[in-house]
Amino acid sequence: MENSSVNENKMGTMPVNKLLLSMAIPIMISMIVQAFYNVVDSIYVSQLSEDALTAVSMAFPIQNFMIAMGSGIGVGTNAVLSRALGEKKQSAADKTAMQGVLLNLISFAIFLIFGIFCAGLFMKSQTNIASIYEGGTEYVRICCVFSIGIFMQLTFERLLQATGRTLYTMFTQTTGAVINIVLDPILIFGLLGAPKLGVAGAAYATVIGQCVAGLMAFILNIKKNPDINFKLSNLAPQWSVIKTILGIGIPSILMISIGSVMTYAMNKILIVFTPTAVAVFGVYFKLQSFVFMPIFGLNNAMVPILAFNYGAKKGDRIHKTIKLAVTYAICIMLIGLAVFQIFPDKLLLLFNASDDMLVIGVHALRIICLSYIFAGFCIITSSVCQAFGHGLYSLYISIGRQIVVLIPAAFILSKIGGLSVVWFAFPVAEIVAMILSIFFLKRSLGKLGLKREAEASA
């Protein structure tokens, strides 16, 4: 009871700005470190060849899909668990945590099978260039077969976040990232007596880092998270709990997975012009993580705060949290916009960019980043809807942005104006997403009966 009371005092009574920052900053730091190791990974791979970089870029949709599964289940688990804690329902919180663990174990089994039997088919659907196909197949297979690490990490880090212990997630994510960064050159280039594994070395460095981070997160939950009682008996399927978690989590899974569909479709559109365009797109996704990861960290801190205060029926704190999160997200996005506009060539040269890659990439980065003007608001809004159990709204926003608008716009623009104009599909799609975000945010708050209060406090 004492621990529960402390947690309630923090989530329910600490000044909102201090609470949001104290929970968000450790996550943001750790996610920036993650973004850094993703970039370092590609920087080392680019030293092998541009085809190697393209292969890793084409593997990204599968990596993103794994993150979608783990993160979506985590969003559902966090929202249900935090609400249960806010309502002081300990047994429900314990069951929710273990059902989240179960769902992620099932996800690992699915990707294990995919990695063994379908990695080659996935790469063959994108390219018939032998060097890209072989490197990409090997990379995808390793990441999938050893995906237990990423699912452990996502599962147990989200449980720490749900109970307000975000500082621990900074330790786990940073440790995993550092291990990856250290192992990358050793395994890719065969340093210190290790075999030279090339693209496969990058994959092994990634999964080793994930496994260590996942193990750390598991241990920290057992030792340092008294708000959850981890009982093996709660690991048996409990369909009512699973249904509730997935009711919130599936829209999030689909929303992130749509990013995989979009990336896959964009790769297909771009490779018609040149594999270099695919490499540029892959590099952009690595670089943009420095901008988006901090906002995702802000989201991970915001969701349990909203869910807890929703359970505790504290509307003022809900509105203050949303306003602060939107403000911080927009500021981060504007910084990202400035960096991409001013230094696109310097960013691309980090990846051993050829002259052709610079010509294509500088133009592409400057156009795509225009979408950042709207993206911060859209990301926060989607997570607000998820926190209150309206995950379908987030899904609608994501479908509108990436499936209904971005992919068709990119395809049409590629036919009308060629490679130089295809990038304008991104800001166009984000404008549509912002319109949808405003509409669904108002509906979500209206369903809580808090709309008038929000307007009064504005």
Image: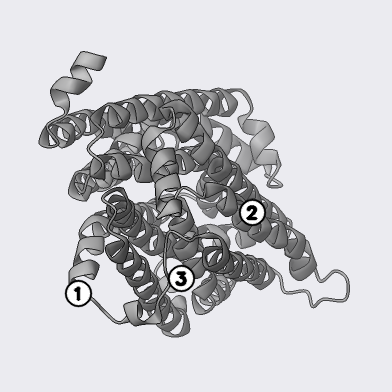
Q: Earlier in the sequence, mark 2 or mark 1?
A: 2
Q: Secondary structure at mark 3?
A: helix
Residue 57 drawn at (x, y percent): 53, 57
What distance separates the C-alpha of mark 3 from that of mark 2? 35 Å
On the question of residue 255 being in view, the answer is no
Q: Mark 2 highlights which residue?
A: 171
Which residue is depicted at the point 50% across and 35% down? 364
**Quick check: 436 left or right of 91?**
left
What distance separates the C-alpha of mark 1 from that of mark 3? 36 Å
Q: Mark 3 highlights which residue?
A: 123
- Against 433, is 157 above or below? below
Q: Quadrant of residue 196?
A: bottom right
On the question of residue 244 being in view, the answer is yes
Q: Earlier in the sequence, mark 1 or mark 3?
A: 3
Q: Mark 1 highlights which residue?
A: 239
Residue closest to the eye, 84 or 166 = 84
Which residue is depicted at the point 24% across and 63% down? 246
Kind of residue sitting beneath label 1: Trp
**Quadrant housing the C terminus:** top left
Q: Quadrant of residue 76?
A: bottom left
Q: Are marks 3 and 2 in contact (CB under 8 Å)?
A: no
Which residue is depicted at the point 34% across and 62% down? 73
Kind of residue sitting beneath label 3: Met
- Against 415, is 42 above or below? below
**Quick check: 92 left or right of 66?**
left
Which residue is depicted at the point 60% across and 50% down? 170
Kind of residue sitting beneath label 2: Phe
Q: Secondary structure at mark 2?
A: helix
* Circle 3 Cα neighbour tier, 10 Å, few/some/many (<14 / 14–19 / ≥20): many
Residue 323 drawn at (x, y percent): 34, 24
Q: Residue extending furthest front?
A: 2
